[in-house]
Image: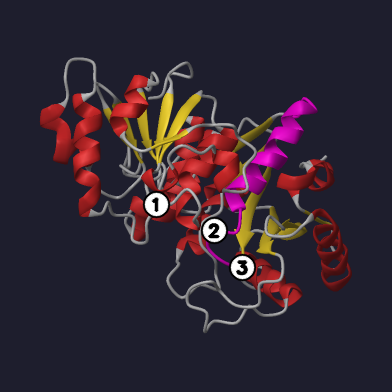
Amino acid sequence: MLNPADNIALYMEDNLDSDYGKMGFGVMRYGQNPVCCVIDSAHAGRRVSEVCALPFDIPVVASVAEAAALGAQVLVIGVAPSGGRAPAEWDAPLRESLRQGLNIVNGLHDDMNARYGDLLRDGQWIWDVRRPAFTPAIAAGRAAALDNKRVLMVGTDMAVGKMSAGLEIHRWLRAQDVDAAFIATGQIGITLTGRGIPLDAFKVDHACGAVEQAVLDAAGHAIVFIEGQGSLLHPGSSATLSLLRGSCATHLIMCHRAGATTLRQPESVRIPLLKDFIRLNEEVARVCGALTESVTIGVALNTAHLNAVDARTAVADLEREVNLPVADVVRDGGGKLGALLL
């Protein structure tokens, strides 16, 4: 629903410097729209580059009113809190944004149209990104009959950069005039691309079918990237299985945070040897040869927390460990892993 010319304000209260701000980080990094400001009263008066490890000279303001004065036309909720629900203290600023005439992009599970629809004026809108647009058929492995390359981003944990890595490699391939598509499966990717499926909003019975339909819709492209969600390792995640089944992926790219030995939450879950976990994902995809043969072509390593020298060392060390190409595609670009698909 976004017009690429609309000025965006990112609502990131108390989270510009936390991992929960990943929606806002993704919009700043990959969005087409101009971002006129970030709303976070804890850091008001500073610039984004002074608060977090993003190189953007975007002003940080304290209120919706200040954002409106700077020319904001759309408020994007840039925080993805645990559980995907808006806390009660966001009610007042969201109501204020509608009174100021702003539209709202909502990536949470809450139905903001139901909550605030009575405040909308003529032409004003709320985009509930996580609202499924269709009820899919039950998946039946139909994508396996396609003759294109289907690349699924998988990971050792939540929020390790699966979307970012996929977008970076996709962007590199497009720059080489390769016919590549990107299927968004979460709220950030859908907001960025304007299309996709909110995978975690579908009923479990329909999740595989939603992925399958999205992949079939992209059948005309030579290479299709499927945005990853969750991890087979995480006890609270079932998303990877739906993505494997629906996409019938031919290729996998493993995403991992450099140096991580446990999940961030719960920390009691240990990350196994990466080569063993890579093999597990491949075996789950293949199911003893009954389903699609899926091969891991490389590892996208998240080194955002390391300096340049330590990042290069981490990449080299992991390459020796797993005997596969490894790259931080956000830091160094998508060419190293993208070339493996040509």
Res 250 seen here: yes
Which circle, 2 or 3, is nearer the viewer?
2
Give how far apart the Cα atoms at labels 2 and 3 are: 9 Å
Give how far apart the Cα atoms at labels 2 and 1 are: 19 Å
Image x and y of residue 183, in percent: 54, 40
Residue farthest to the left?
A: 118
User: Is 304 included in the stretch rendered in magenta?
Assistant: no
Type of the residue with mark 3: Thr
Q: Which mark is residue 159?
A: 2
User: Image quadrant of residue 37?
Assistant: top left
Q: Is residue 150 placed above or below 192 in the rendered structure?
A: below
**10 Å crowding of disc 3: few (<14), some (14-19), many (20+):** many
Q: Which mark is residue 179?
A: none
Magenta region: 156-178
How many dots with numbers? 3
Residue pictured at 31% horizontal, 44% vertical: 135
Residue pictured at 47% horizontal, 61% vertical: 239
* Comes first in the chain, label 1 or label 3: 1
Which circle, 2 or 1, is nearer the viewer?
1
Type of the residue with mark 2: Ala
Cβ–Cβ below 8 Å for labels 2 and 3?
Answer: no
Would residue 99 be found to the left or right of residue 250 on screen?
left
Q: Which residue is mark 3?
A: 156
Image x and y of residue 179, in percent: 71, 29
Q: Which residue is mark 1?
A: 14
